[in-house]
Amino acid sequence: MLPQKLQKKLEERQQNMSLRTLPVFKQLVDFSSNDYLGFSGNAIIFNATHQYLINHNFLKNGATGSRLLSGNHNLYDELESKLALFHQSKAAIVYNSGYDANIGFFSCVPQRGDLVFYDEYIHASIRDGIAMSNAKSYKFKHNSLSDLEKLVERHSAIIKDDETATYVVTESVFSMDGDSPNLKEMALFCKEYKLFFVVDEAHAVGVFSDLGQGLVQELQLVDLVFARIITFGKALGCHGAAILGSVELKNYLVNFSRSFIYTTALAPHSVASILQSYYFLESKEGKMQQQLLQSAIQFFKNEVDQRGLKEYFIPSNSAIQCCLISGNNKVKSIAKKLEENGFNVKAILSPTVPRGEERLRFCLHAYNTPKEIEKVITVLCNHIKE
């Protein structure tokens, strides 16, 4: 038996058709995973990781402890050096997951008396991290620089205090919308007002820039960003995350980031997998996967346009394409129809997204063929117009 308050919350979810359950794996055409480049099932990366561990005599199943105790094996140095070089950063620090990185950063970097201004659609892990800090936080309208300007103006007296640090937080690609802010304008605004600009690049790495470095590098904004959060569980097909920034920021996180300090480190195999994924990303074959992904994105958008469905979709150039279908019941019904036709497309329900903005979230991949894309849009078109 659960406490009555908890049982009531479950029943409320059941009533509004938003109760989460763990899905049963089905062999369907993948339009739902974050494996944008297909790296998670890539045999070259798998075999290279295995051989690398043998060649370097890393025959261990686990890290044996936190990085500050026994878990800081030599692979970490190689990976963090690689990440810093690849992403044009002074330093990189690896975390066990994107969630750990975000709560680890935002719970300890903003201090009491500081301000955090964040996009209203920011990821839950960032919200949780901010809630754990002692800073005051305020949200601004999604992708709205003008609303951010109003926040800055409203708190200008505090911001001008030399003892106050003000952080502006956004994502380069939003996970539930697939859209992006005007990063260049926002970065220049932060520079003008001496604000610390923080960008989560989880869904941009591997997808944007010439080698998949992300949007911050594609737009040449590295020097204007205080910290970037990148993850390896999306396009890189692995697990873990990293924070990119200055050497001083890394030193601070090593000393004060609780989700970094008080956890067992990633196993050598996990770290080697990330390293080999980056090497593959830079290869001719990796570049080909990126080109296939971009072709799939463009083909999908063209199909949406030709079928007269453009009004339903949030504008996006990313691998995430979202079709707005209001109501939990309706969006779940269409997702079920797509599943019956062999396609795995996730319905995103309220309260994960605001009520009335429920959606089908299409995640595109390098391995999605034009035939698969054409068919899934056909099925969607038939049922959405019913």
Image: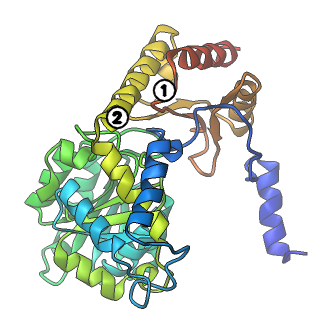
Q: Secondary structure at mark 1?
A: loop
Residue found at the very far bottom of the displayed protein: 69
Give the residue drawn at x 46%, y 74%.
131
Residue 231 sits above or below residue 134 on the image: above
Q: How many marks?
A: 2
In the rendering, at what x and y percent does residue 231 appear?
40, 57
Say which of marks 1 and 2 sits in front. Answer: 2
Quadrant the C terminus occupies: top right
- Tell me the kind of residue under disc 1: Phe
- Residue topped by disc 1: 313
Give the residue drawn at x 22%, y 37%.
210
Residue 296 sits above or below residue 178 on the image: above
How packed is label 2: few (under 14 Cα within 10 Å), some, or many (20 or more)? few
How packed is label 1: few (under 14 Cα within 10 Å), some, or many (20 or more)? some
Q: Is residue 355 visible?
A: yes
Residue 10 sits above or below residue 280 on the image: below
- Residue topped by disc 2: 285
In the rendering, at what x and y percent does residue 136 appear?
36, 75
Q: Quadrant of residue 241?
A: bottom left
* 20 left or right of 252 in image: right
In the rendering, at what x and y percent does residue 157 appear?
16, 74
Quadrant the N terminus occupies: bottom right
Q: Is residue 205 visible?
A: no
Q: Secondary structure at mark 2?
A: helix
Residue at mark 1 to residue at mark 2: CA–CA distance: 31 Å
In the rendering, at what x and y percent does residue 240 appear?
45, 63
Residue found at the very far left of the displayed protein: 192
